[in-house]
Amino acid sequence: MSEKISLFKEDGRRLDDRAPDELRPIKIKVGVLSNAQGSAYIEQGKNKILAAVYGPKEALPKHISLPDRCILRCRYHMAPFSTPERKSPAPSRREIELSMVIRNALEPLVMTSLFPRTVIDIFIEVLQADGGTRCAGLTAAVLALADAGIPLKGLTAACAVGKADGKVIVDLNDLEDKYGEADMPIAYNPTLDGITLLQMDGIMSKEEIEQALSLAITATQKIHKMQVEALKERFSVPRREG
Amino acid sequence: MSEKISLFKEDGRRLDDRAPDELRPIKIKVGVLSNAQGSAYIEQGKNKILAAVYGPKEALPKHISLPDRCILRCRYHMAPFSTPERKSPAPSRREIELSMVIRNALEPLVMTSLFPRTVIDIFIEVLQADGGTRCAGLTAAVLALADAGIPLKGLTAACAVGKADGKVIVDLNDLEDKYGEADMPIAYNPTLDGITLLQMDGIMSKEEIEQALSLAITATQKIHKMQVEALKERFSVPRREG
Amino acid sequence: MSEKISLFKEDGRRLDDRAPDELRPIKIKVGVLSNAQGSAYIEQGKNKILAAVYGPKEALPKHISLPDRCILRCRYHMAPFSTPERKSPAPSRREIELSMVIRNALEPLVMTSLFPRTVIDIFIEVLQADGGTRCAGLTAAVLALADAGIPLKGLTAACAVGKADGKVIVDLNDLEDKYGEADMPIAYNPTLDGITLLQMDGIMSKEEIEQALSLAITATQKIHKMQVEALKERFSVPRREG
Amino acid sequence: MSITEQRPIISKLEKQELYRLLAEGKRVDGRGLLQYRNLNVQLNYIEKAEGSALVELGNTKILAAVKVGVALPFADTPNEGILIVNAELVPLASPVFEPGPPSEESISLARYVDRSIRESKAVDLSSLCIIPGRSVYSLYVDLYILDYDGNLIDASVIASVNALGTTKLPKYSVEGQSIKKLDEYFKLELKDLPVSITYAFFGDKYVVDPCLNEEYASDFTISMTVKSDDRFCAIQKNGGGMISPRGFLELLDKSIALGKELRSIAYSKLSGNG
Amino acid sequence: MSITEQRPIISKLEKQELYRLLAEGKRVDGRGLLQYRNLNVQLNYIEKAEGSALVELGNTKILAAVKVGVALPFADTPNEGILIVNAELVPLASPVFEPGPPSEESISLARYVDRSIRESKAVDLSSLCIIPGRSVYSLYVDLYILDYDGNLIDASVIASVNALGTTKLPKYSVEGQSIKKLDEYFKLELKDLPVSITYAFFGDKYVVDPCLNEEYASDFTISMTVKSDDRFCAIQKNGGGMISPRGFLELLDKSIALGKELRSIAYSKLSGNG
Amino acid sequence: MSITEQRPIISKLEKQELYRLLAEGKRVDGRGLLQYRNLNVQLNYIEKAEGSALVELGNTKILAAVKVGVALPFADTPNEGILIVNAELVPLASPVFEPGPPSEESISLARYVDRSIRESKAVDLSSLCIIPGRSVYSLYVDLYILDYDGNLIDASVIASVNALGTTKLPKYSVEGQSIKKLDEYFKLELKDLPVSITYAFFGDKYVVDPCLNEEYASDFTISMTVKSDDRFCAIQKNGGGMISPRGFLELLDKSIALGKELRSIAYSKLSGNG
C-alpha cells in the first residue's frame, strides 16, 4: 500500500471493469481429485486453488486426540510458482497465520463431536494467486469437507471486502489488495447468520466497516449459492451418455 | 580479547570505580512471576536476568524419565535485545553449551532421588547482558528452585573471576570480559565446600588461578548471603499494611 | 561435464596410467572399529571410506518396525573435508538420494526375515572422495554387514563404469567423473547374478551401455574376490606371535 | 499444519461459576464486563536497547525492546525504513509455552502488532531513509512475554508503541554512498498512538481484556486496533465460534470509546519521556 | 537416514489377482503389459508463470511451472544459465505424502528429472548467459504432484519438458555491467525432447507405466530416459530387488521403441504453442 | 534444552570392580592412575585437505582435517584470519551418537578445542590476513570422531594441533583490492603446542585419560589445557558432582607435569613434517 496509483476508471468502474460491489468470475468444481476423500477446485479471477480433505481418521500420535470430538488440521500453502516472484516452498509466517484463521473458521462448521479421537486433515494449495486467496481457499475447503461426506452445519462462503481510492469495494484483486486502503476478509455462514473468519488490515472508519460488512454479506450469499450449485452438480445422477 | 585498552584507572581502581576484589551492585528478588512454580530476578551491574522453575512434573515422553530420580532440563537463553547487536532468538552454540554447564552445576544441588520419573524445568532468560550472565543466571536459578519448594542441599552462588591488565579481579563486567586476559566462572556451594561450575578461558598461571579461586570463594560467599536474605524476604510474614 | 579436457594419453592409457578396463588399486580391511558390531575400510584410488553396522536391535519408535522382517536404515555421509571445497556436514540432496539407493541395493542381500521387528543401521562415512564413492561405500558396507555376523545371500560388489573421450571405461576417478561423458554405477551380486544398484548419468547409446555393463560385471567379480579375501583375513586364526 | 489446540482444562465448576457470574454481569476477579485490569508501564527498562518498555496488564507481563540498525531497503520501498516485529513466547512465562521455533500463536501475535503499527502509520517509515535504495534504518521490535495471564494482544500493542516512543536513533552523516555513525541521537516521533481492544465471547455475553481463565473458557476473541482519530487499522478474530454481523457492528462504538480511555492511560508516560 | 519404507498394505487377494493376471499377460486395469495410460497435456496452465504444463497420466496429475529470474552464475560455469528442478509431493495428493521438508522420494524424483533435462541438453544453458560471470538467467522448474496414482517419474519428465517448451524469457539490455529488463520476450528453444520410460518388476514379469497398486505390489522399478536420437541420458533403479544383466539389456530396445511412441504423444502440443 | 543424560548402564559388578581397583590404586585396564593410554599419531592422513592428522588414544580414534579458504574478516577483527572448529560425533563411532544436528556434547567439545587453540595463540591469526578488512585466510578445523572410547577432549586437542601443524596455505598475490591464487604454498607456523589433560573423578579418587567405562562410572571430569610455558588457557568441568577448592588446586601441578610429558609425545612427529 505504498505508491499512489488510481484503481478506478473515469466511468467509475474498477480497472478490471467491475462495479464496486461486483464479484470476479467464479468457477467451482467439486470432486476433482481421486485420492482425497473430498476435494474442490475454485477459480476466482486469476486465483486457482485446490482443496482436499482426508479423514476422519485415527489421530496419531494419540496425545493430540480429544476424547469428545475430532480435531482439525489445516494447511494453507502456496505453490512456489503461484506468486510473481518464486516463493520458497517452506511455510512463511503468513501461511502459518492463514492456516490458523482458516482452521478457526472451519471449527464451528464441522460437527466434530460425531467423531471423537479422530482427525480431519484439510489441505489448501494455491496454484495461482490473485488476491483474496484465503477466502477463495476457504470457500473451496468447505466444499471439500462436504464432498468427503463430513456432516456440516450448513456451508460457509468467504470473500474479502475493503476500500480503494476512498470507495468501499468487494472481492479485491491483487492490485486492489496491494494499492488499496483496506482489506477485510470475511467468512459468513448464511444458515447460521455467523461470521467465522474476520480480519482487517488497512484503515477504515466505523461507517466504512459497516458498509463493507453489508457488501460482504451479499457477496458471500452469492458465493454460497454457487457452492450449492457445485455440490448439486457433483451429486446429480449422471445421464446415460451417447 | 583483541585491542589494547586500559582497564584500570590511575588510582588502581577499575573503570567502574571498583576495587579488584569488589562485586558490582547486586539486587535479588525471589517470587517475581505468577505462573512459574518458582522464580527469581537478579540485577548484577547492568545484567538483568530472570529465572523460573516448573516441576517436578511427569516426564514426557516417558523414555526420557529415570526410574530412580528426577531429571533436570535447563535452558539458558538471551533475549534478542540483550546484546549490543540484536541476537537471533534461535539458540546459539554458546547458549547450548551454557545450558549444559548450568544444568551440570545444578544436578548435585537438587535432591533428585525424591522425585523419581519426573522432570524439573529450569529457564533462565537474560534480558540485558553485561558480563558474567551464566553466573548471575545460575545464582537466580538456584533461588527459583528454592522458591519452587524443591529440596536442595544448600544454596549455590556463582561469580566469575579473572584477570585484566595483569591483575586478578572479581566479577568481570562486559568490558573486562572482552578486553581482559582471562575469565573463570565459578559456582561454589559454601555449605558443601564444593565447586559445581568451573570453566576458564584466557591465560593464567598456576599462581594466578590460585589467587583468583580465593577471590571467587569470598565473592560467592557474599552472594550466598544475599541469596539467603532474598529468600527470607520472600518467605517473611507480610506485615499488615496501613 | 562442462569444459573440454582430454582424459586419455597418447598411448591410449588413462591419465592415471590405467587401461580402460583397469581398476584403481583397492585396499580393503574388515573389522577396523571397536564399537560397531561390524566395520570395514576401503581405499579405492584416493577414496577413503569407512562403513559400520549396528544391529539387529530393537526398532524404536515401535511404529517403524515390521512384523515379518527387520528394517534397514542407511546413511551415506561425506566428511566436510572429503571434497575440494569444504562441505557442510548437514546432508545434501545428493547424500539423501545415495543413502536411499545404497539401502535399496542392500535390502535384497540381507536375510531380513530372520530378525522381525528389529532394525539394522548402516553408516558409510566418506573421509576422502575421489569418484565412485557410492560404489566403494557399498562394497565396504556389505563387508561391515558380514563382519557383524548378519546372514547375507552372498556378497555384493559395486563399481562405476562409464564413458570418457568416447571410450567405455571402468572405475572412473574424480576427473573422469567430472569431465567424462557418462557415469553408470552398478552393484552386482555374482552368486545371485543380480544387479541391485543401477543408475546412469550422461549420454550413452544402447551399444555403449551393453559394453559398459560387461565391463562392470568383470570389475565387480574382481572386487568380489577381494571382499572374500578381506573376510578370510579377518576371520583367519591369528598366528601365535613372537 | 495448524491443529486444533488442546486448551488446559479449567475445572467444570470454575467454568460454571464464570458463566453464572457473567449472567449477573460480573466477572471472576470482580471487574466490570468492559473494565480493563490495572495497567502499569515502565519506560526504558532495557538501557542497552534503543527503546524499551515493560508493561504489566494485571498479571500479564510483556517486555518490548527496539534495536536499531542500518540495512539495505526492500527493493519495492527504496525510500523507507524497515520495521520488523517479533514475539517470543518464552517457556518461563507459562507451562503452555514451549522452547523451539515460533509457534503459530507467536507468529499471529507478532503479525497483528505489526499491522497495528504499520497500518496506523504510527511510525513514519519514509523518515527512516538515510540514502535512498541503499541505507535505511531498521527497527526490530522484539516482544518478550514474561508472564502470561491472557490478552497478549492488547498488552503487546501498548508495549510496542511505548518502546517505539522511547526510541532514540543514532544520526549518520552521508558522504557520497557511504555513511558514518555520529555521536548524536534523535527521538523517533510517533504519528499515532494505536491501541488494541480485545473482547472474549461466551455465548451471547462478552467481556473486554480477558484474563487467561476467561480466554480458556471463551468461544473466541476479537481484537480491534483503533487509531487516535477513531478509525480502525486492524481487526482479528481468534479461535473458533462465530459472531453475528449485528454483534460485530456493536463492537465498533464500544472500541472507539474504550480506545480513547485506554490510550490516555497507556501512553501517559510517553509525553514526559525526553 | 534412509529407512525401509512401509508400503501401504494392498490386500493379499488384490496382489494374487494382479499376479494371476500378469501370468496371463494382463493387467488390473485391462491395459497391455507395455501400454501407457491415457496421457493428457494442458499447456500454459499457470498464466503468471513464464512456462507451465498440467499433465494427467491416468489418475496421476502433475503440474510443472517455470519461474525465470536473473542470478549470479556458478563460479565454475560463468557462461551458463542456472537450471533448478524441485518437486513437491504435497499432502493433498495422497495420504502417504506428509507436509514438511522434502522427503527422499521427492528429492530423488527431482534429481532424476534434473538429470534427464540436463544430460539430454534439452535446454542449452550456454544460451542463457546475459553477462558472463555476472548475470545469467535462472530457470526454476517446480513440479507439483496433485494426484498420485503411480509413475511420477515419467509424468514429471513430460510435465517439465512441456513447461520448459512453453517458457518465455524477458529480454534484457546490457549497459556496461548492469542490465535492464525490456518489455520483450523470447521463447526458450528446446534442443531435445527426452522421455522417461518406467518399468515395474514382479518376479520374472514386468509392465510399463505402473499405476500405484502395481508400484506397491512390485519388487522394484527401473526408469530410463531416452533422447530424441535414441541414446540414453538417465537410468535409475528404485526399490529393492535385483535384475539380471540379461534382463536389464532387454529393456534397452524396448525403451527406444516405447520412447519414440511416447515422445510423439507427449510433446504434440508443443509445436502448436507459439 | 539441556537434559540430564541417560548414560548407558554399566553393570553394577563392573562399577564395583572399578571402585575396588581404584581403592588399590589400580585401573581396569592395568594402567596407573595418572597414566595415559598408548597414543598414535598419523600426519597428513587426508591428502586432499590442507592439513590433517589421525589420532588414536587407546581405542578412541579421531581424525582432524583443516580446510583453507579465503573469506571476509569479521568486522571487529579486520586484520585477522578466521579459525573455526567443528566436531562431528558421527554415529559410526558409537551407539550413543545419533545422526542429526550437532548435539550439546559435540558443540561443547568443539568450543573447548577452539578455546584451547585460540587462547594459547598457537595460531597467529594476525599472520593470516591478505588484505585488511577484505580478504583473510579461513581455517576450518573439522574433528571427526571415528571410534569412541572416552576422553574425546584430550585426543581432539592433539588431533587439531597436529592437523594445524601440517597445514600448508596457498600464497596469494595482491593486485589492488583483488587477489590471485598462486601455485606456491607456505607452512602454517605454530606458536604454541597446547595439550589438554582430562581427569575423571570417583568419590575422592581420580584418574587421568579416562576410557569410556571410566567416564560412565565417574561423577564428573575436569579438563585443563596447558601451554608450552606451563600456563593454563582453558579449563572445563563436565558433568554433575562437585570438587573442593583444595582438590581443584591440587590438579594444577599435576597438569603442568603431565602436560610436559604428553606434549613431547603428542607432537613428536610435527618436527619431522616438512
Image (cartoon, coloured by chain):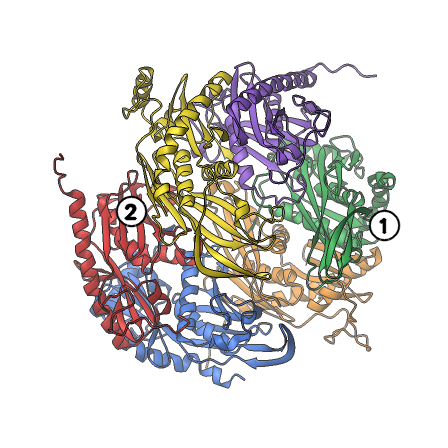
Chain colours: A orange, B purple, C red, D green, E blue, F yellow
Q: Secondary structure at mark 2?
A: loop
A75 vs F94, nearest the viewer: F94
Q: Which residue is mark 1?
A: D228
Asked if disc 2 and disc 1 are in contact, CB closer than 8 Å, the reply is no
Amino acid bearing label 1: Ser
E26 vs A84, nearest the viewer: A84
The disc placed on residue C70 is 2
Observer able to see residue A141:
yes
The disc placed on residue D55 is none
Q: How many marks?
A: 2
Amino acid bearing label 2: Cys
E250 vs C167, nearest the viewer: C167
Q: Position of residue B195 (x, y in %)?
A: 52, 21
Chain of residue at mark 2 = C
Q: Secondary structure at mark 1?
A: loop
In the figure, is residue E190 to the left or right of E68? left
Mark 1 Cα shell of 10 Å, populated few (<14), some (14-19), many (≥20):
some
